[in-house]
Amino acid sequence: GAGVSQSPRYKVAKRGQDVALRCDPISGHVSLFWYQQALGQGPEFLTYFQNEAQLDKSGLPSDRFFAERPEGSVSTLKIQRTQQEDSAVYLCASSPLEGEAFFGQGTRLTVV
Amino acid sequence: DAKTTQPTSMDCAEGRAANLPCNHSTISGNEYVYWYRQIHSQGPQYIIHGLKNNETNEMASLIITEDRKSSTLILPHATLRDTAVYYCIVRVVFTGGGNKLTFGTGTQLKVEL
């Protein structure tokens, strides 16, 4: 596809359940970012990959959050033992090494 | 990265120019001004960026004051589809990638008939 694709678009999880969110970046984009957006707020940075290397994970809120990009393309954001405060939209963005970021539509996670 | 201040919301009549202000009084000499927008239920979309000169592209114009402490994003002929949250971001651009964005709460622009 032409853009960044994220799946699923919506996810409802029971508190304590593990979830996995997928991001398919634009083909050839070296950089991949994950952001978290709470209702009514701007997106907040979670983590950054350059190819398969996770170079910055300073924004991950706890050790329940884990991201990977094993082959330098598709990325997965995993949240273990979900809590209500994890409810948010999770946005993925990709870019060339130096260039503007293109965002996906996001995955809306609701923890009940 | 320097902090920015934007109005919470603005209204604009369709067909008129929308002028969105941003204050960034603590901007450093090597920080760029970026604008993104986010239409409801979509991811943010890049609009334009600049360092100190005014910039124009097919989407908008960016006017940066001479002292670089403020800027204005101009949508010359706003349409209903321009209704969105507009984010002004200032940041250093490092070579070698990893240039994450620090979003604030932005300006909710509502374009009306």
Image (cartoon, rainbow, N blue to C red):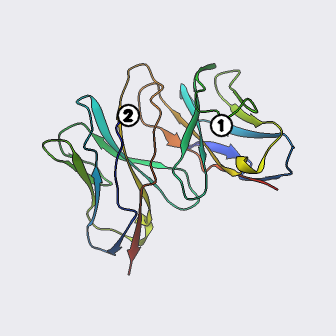
Q: Chain of mark 2?
A: B
Same chain under badges 1 and 2? The reply is no
Residue at the image point whose x is 55% and y is 59% from the top: A40
Whether residue A30 sits left or right of residue B28 in the image: it is right
Name the residue tied to disc 2: B1
- Front residue of A49 and A18: A18
- Front residue of B16 and A41: A41
Q: Quadrant of the N terminus of chain A?
A: top right
Whether residue A34 sits left or right of residue A78 in the image: it is left
Residue at the image point whose x is 80% and y is 43% from the top: A82
Residue at the image point whose x is 65% and y is 35% from the top: A61
Would residue B62 be visible to someone looking at this image? no
- Front residue of B63 and B10: B10
Count of marks overlaid on the render? 2
Q: Secondary structure at mark 1?
A: strand
Query: Percent x, y for residue B85?
Result: 45, 59
In the displayed structure, A61 sits above or below B63; it is above
Name the residue tied to disc 1: A24
Would residue A53 be visible to someone looking at this image? yes
Query: Percent x, y for residue A34?
Result: 60, 37
Q: Which mark is residue A2?
A: none
Q: Secondary structure at mark 2?
A: loop
